[in-house]
Image (cartoon, rainbow, N blue to C red):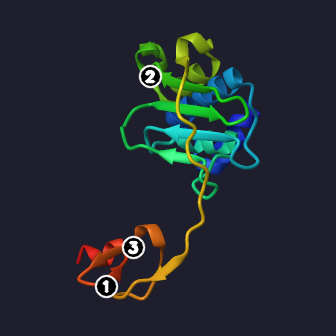
Amino acid sequence: MNSEFDEIAKFHGHKCPGLAMGYRMTKAAMNRLSETSAADEELVAIVENDACGTDALQWLTRCTFGKGNFIFKDYGKQIFTLYSRNTGKGVRVHFKDGAVPESARASKPDMIAWILAADEKDVVDAKEVSLEPPPKAQIYKSIKCDFCGEGTMQTRIKQVDGKSLCIPCSLK
């Protein structure tokens, strides 16, 4: 198969069609942006699902929640948008699920093989998009929750009846 995909599968835990989709989507976006992985925040990923393919995106781009350059929007769509702070360009990539032939849907290995081998134009739609640069990661002070005592990011503290509460405690 593909040694890079094999490494991604080790990171993810198994090989599956969703991982192959994410691999092809990410490679298409990175090629259009002429970008490699992000050492810091120069590349930003906006993902519209929390499925297997996002692991391929994280592995290839090095965009992560921890660095603040991995943004999750829970829309349930097989769509990734990559934005380069170096060039100010963005690329939105959509996986063409309807393009997968029935013969490739016979088994997971068949579908993975087809997704990895198909011409890019048969697998993804990628188009340049304009977007506001996402804000860079911020470091905020931690505040102790007055109920549970756990440190909580300042921006996530809720004021309830004069007390500073973390979100879970504020919902009790």
Q: Residue 28 at what x, y percent from top left?
A: 64, 23
In the visual, does 98 lie left or right of 35?
left
Marks 1, 2: nearer the viewer: 1
Is residue 56 visible in the rendered image? The answer is no
Q: In which quarter of the image is the N terminus?
A: top right
For disc 2, the neighbor class at 10 Å (few under 14, some 14 to 19, many from 20) is: few
Residue 7, image x and y in percent? 71, 43
Say which residue appears at 28% left-offset and 75% top-offset: 170
Q: Residue 13 carries which label?
A: none
Q: What residue is disc 3 on?
A: 157
Image position of 77 with respect to 171: above or below? above
The disc, 1 or 3, on the residue closer to the chain's N-terminal end is 3
Q: Can you tell which of label 3 and label 2 is closer to the viewer?
A: 3
Amino acid type of disc 2? Ala
Where 31 falls versus 61 (above or below)?
above
Residue shown at 73% from the left, 34% from the top: 86
The amino acid marked with disc number 3 is Ile
Query: In what quadrant of the picture does the C terminus appear?
Result: bottom left
Residue designated by label 2 = 106
Between the residue at mark 3 and the residue at mark 2, the CA separation in whole angstroms equals: 50 Å
Q: Name the residue under label 1.
A: 163
Helix, strand or loop status at disc 2: helix
Q: How far apart are marks 1 and 2 (CA)?
A: 57 Å
In depth, the one of 157 and 93 nearer the eye is 157
Quarter of the rendering containing residue 146: bottom left
Which badge, 1 or 2, is on the more N-terminal residue? 2
User: Percent x, y for residue 68?
Assistant: 59, 53
